[in-house]
Amino acid sequence: MSPHAGSTGPQSPATLAFVESPVQLLNVLEWAHAHALKAAALRSTGETSGPPGPELGAGRPGGTGRFGRSGRPGGSGRPGGPGGPGGPDRTGAARPGEAGTGLTLVVLSPTDPMTRGQLRRMAELARDEGYDVRWEEARGGTTAPFHTVGGLAPLLRRARRIVMGDPFSRYVQLLLTITRARDLVVVDDGTATMEFVSQLARGERLVRWHRRGGRPGARDLVFAPVSARARRRLTPGAGRRVEIFSSMPIDETPEGVDVSANDFAWTRARFGPPRITKGADLVGTSLVETGVVDPDRYLEAVKGLAGTYGATRYFAHRRESPEKLHRLAVETGLEIVRPDLPLELIARRGPIGRTILSFPSTVVHTLPLALAGTDVKVAVFDIDPAWLTENASPRAQGFLSGVTDTARDAHRLSAITAT
């Protein structure tokens, strides 16, 4: 695929969305769907709301609908039918890709093979919705960042709205220093959104929760001016509008920031309902890979969960290492599943277990929304403090406990102590 594959012409999009992970791309689709529904509702009542700007879309009505509402080839999303190109979705509103020109999704591709594979599948879904997708090999060598930033600069200067999935990303922070857009939208990047909102509200520097505490490193110091400028751009004021579109609990809303709820309406309209099996499925986490949890303790915890609740499948996180997954398969007997789409879509398509077991992570907030109306139960287990590594951030335990404490629609179960 060429770096700019999916670009439909020289016309500058009014809205640029930057994504670096499959979940971020999914949440941009959810935001665009919610935006289109809100705009349609306002038009029907003759009202207007929000900043002036173009409708969302990719310049071509609908798409091929290859996945349909079921998420499989040949699904019920056929052309002209409910949920298919040229027709309304289950809510009766026009599909967002039919609204006209406006939105281009820019994929700042990572190097991890699993993430790239899921991003390519999500890019297909975005094109099926009628959106333009621009794929950037943003990390394909030492000169790649210069080519990427240079190629995007003209679009950034003309864009009226910027949507981003990861405000902690140095790439995104650098791009924010170029754009003149006055309308900025942050969509969910999982639990990191909770930390971003808190840091923005308190005026703190933007740093990921699992980074070890202490003095900033040399790279942090060099990049500090860019990060500080990006934080100022993400603070409402001087004609700037900032929106956070999230499914996560937000208790500390920064002054002037608009918060809108992501209830996974697009996912539920396009996929499922799923076939539900009698057993349990277990959701993996990358806490070992990020240096937060000891690998041996994690293995024992997974083994205990599988034995206690009869789990047979383990849905791997895209960042989990092959070595760790092989060890899990050998020592627990679990079937390791490497999803080719975000778990919210995999679960909605089915088949999925009647009980989904998870450690504290984004999915304990998102899966109950994506699976609303089904009989699936999501259960979350606390991380025992004894599992944490000596390199874990001092904030790790409190943050992970907060993820569990605020999971409104997930069942909290007793922690399993690894031995």
Image (tube, helix red, strand yellow):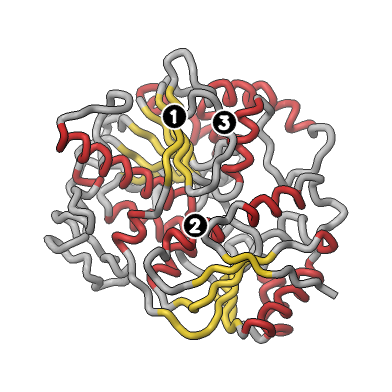
Q: Nearer the viewer, mark 3 or mark 2?
A: 2
Name the residue rendered at 54%, 71% in the picture.
Answer: 338
Residue 49 seen in the current view: yes
SS class of the residue under badge 3?
A: helix
Q: Residues within 10 Å of mark 2 (few under 14, many from 20)?
A: many
* Classed neighbour count for the residue bearing mark 1: other residues with Cα under 10 Å, few (<14), some (14–19), many (≥20): many
Mark 1 falls on what kind of element? strand
Relative depth, front residue between 31 and 154: 31
* Percent position of residue 345, x then y: 42, 64
Which residue does the image show at 30% across and 70% down from the upper left?
A: 70
Q: Is residue 293 above or below residue 406?
A: below
Q: Nearer the viewer, residue 275 or 4?
A: 275
What residue is pinned by disc 1?
Answer: 184
Q: What separation in Å lies between label 1 and label 2 (alpha carbons)?
A: 23 Å
Residue furthest to the top: 238
**Percent x, y of residue 288:** 73, 61
Residue at mark 2: 366
User: Which numbered mark, 1 or 3, is in the foreground of this view?
Assistant: 1
376 left or right of 292? left
What residue is rendered at 60% in x and 37% in y?
Answer: 196
Calculate the distance from the C-alpha at mark 1 to the C-alpha at mark 3: 12 Å
Instruction: Where is residue 144? Give x, y as percent.
Output: 55, 39
Query: Which residue is the site of mark 3?
Result: 173
Q: Nearer the viewer, mark 1 or mark 2?
A: 2
Q: Which of marks 1 and 2 is nearer the N terminus?
A: 1
**Given the current orientation, which residue lies at the most extreme right position?**
390
| Disc with the residue nearer the chain's start (3 vs 2) | 3
Q: Which amino acid does label 3 sit on?
A: Gln
